[in-house]
Image: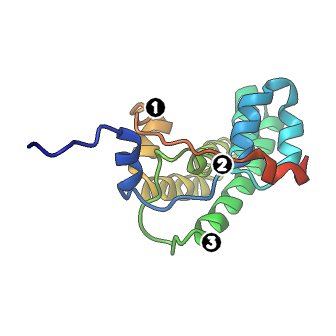
Amino acid sequence: MAEEQNTDLTAEIEEQDYGVRLPPDPAIRKLAKRGRDEFMAVVKENPSSTLCWALLAEGSLLSNTDAADVAAYAYARTGRDLGLEQLREAGWDGEGPVDWGYLPNQGVFRCLHALAMAAERLGFGDESDDADTLLRELSDEAWRALRGDDVPSDRAVDVEVDEGEFDHQE
């Protein structure tokens, strides 16, 4: 009798090691559920969400003004610093890959990309290069996707978040 094959691709993906993974980010579900009208409320409720900081930075970069570029730089640096701290707490020791396909990690990557762009616009070429280099070291796949050289992976893994455990923040 033939062995039964596992056809659950999600389980197969989750079993593979693509690098460090952050804990679930409750802001992801809140943003999806509550939408643009409540964006700033979600940001205020989730100040440690790197995705929130990335979205703030990316939105500022779209404005294409000097003041918005300064704001983007500040948002992206905040998100980068939070993200690197969270990665260390998750077991990252400063080397090795971080999983681009894991949704809660994507805020860190997006903050690094936004920081590289904002720093470049502000004339901080060395800092722009450093952010771009760190992004590539963490995940070449993320670096290519965010630069537009590649499309995001179809192996993105979302996680369930029990919103009840975060109700104290609302």
The amino acid type found where label 1 is placed reads Gly
Q: Is the residue marked by circle 1 packed among few (<14), some (14-19), or many (20+) residues within 10 Å?
A: few
Q: Can residue 64 be seen in this view?
A: no
Q: Where is residue 9 in the image (x, y as percent from the top left)?
A: 35, 39
Q: Where is residue 131 in the image (x, y as percent from the top left)?
A: 56, 55
The amino acid type found where label 2 is placed reads Ala
Give the image quarter of residue 2: top left
**Relative to residue 72, is residue 126 depicted above or below?**
below
Mark 2 or 3, closer to the camera: 3
Residue carrying label 3: 89
Numbered disc 1: secondary structure: loop
Q: Position of residue 86 (x, y in %)?
A: 65, 65
Residue carrying label 2: 119
- The answer for how far apart the CA atoms under marks 2 and 3 are is 27 Å
For the N terminus, the quadrant is top left
**Relative to residue 18, is residue 154 depicted above or below?**
above
